[in-house]
Image (tube, rainbow, N blue to C red):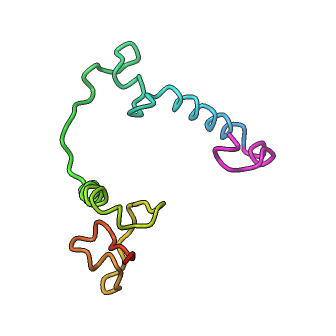
Amino acid sequence: MCELYRIRHSEFLRWPTSDRHKAVMYQLRKGECCPDCGTHPDLTDPRRGGHPDAVVMAPVHCRVCEIRERGMQRWERDKKNYPAGTTLRVQPAPPPGEATDAEHHHDHDVPRSTSP
């Protein structure tokens, strides 16, 4: 618990007993969730009050995922132009009007190479 909350054990012991119990129980409950999708079995298990069809698959559009996907496609094509060890990450865009190398790339997905 202390590692998770990044506190000393003595600090954890100063928490009210009910808060310590809640923190432990929360972690135990999280441990029962599917490691792949994060769903707790209660949601779909009728023996636990759930329903087998409690969830459905539905297409969802996310602009950030779209940018990331296009950026990764360009990255696969252009990564040879970058120094070894260069990676991509999604990060906030600079404020409007603030010039960056990325602004020179047509849709800001992948920064321009600084290599000659």
Does 4 appear in magenta? yes
Residue 76 location (% of width, % of height): 30, 55
Q: Say which residue appears at 40% left-offset and 65% top-offset.
A: 91
Q: Magenta span: helix, strand or loop, mainly?
A: helix
Q: Say which residue appears at 22% left-offset and 31% top-offset.
A: 56
Residue 95 location (% of width, % of height): 35, 80
Q: Does residue 77 appear to the left or right of 37 in the view shown?
A: left
Q: Say which residue appears at 25% left-offset and 74% top-offset.
A: 105
Residue 112 location (% of width, % of height): 32, 74
Q: Quadrant of residue 83?
A: bottom left
> Where is the N terminus found, in terms of image quarters?
top right
Q: Which residues are magenta?
A: 1-15
Q: Which of the two residues, 18 or 103, is positioned nearer the viewer here?
A: 103
Q: Quadrant of residue 69?
A: bottom left
Q: Does residue 101 appear to the left or right of 31 in the view shown?
A: left
> Where is the C terminus found, in terms of image quarters?
bottom left
Q: Which of the two residues, 3 or 49, is positioned nearer the viewer here?
A: 3
Residue 60 location (% of width, % of height): 21, 46
Identity of the residue furthest to the top in this view: 47
Does 28 appear in magenta? no
Q: Say which residue appears at 39% left-offset and 75% top-offset.
A: 115
Q: Does residue 59 appear to the left or right of 13 in the view shown?
A: left
Q: Does residue 57 appear to the left or right of 3 in the view shown?
A: left
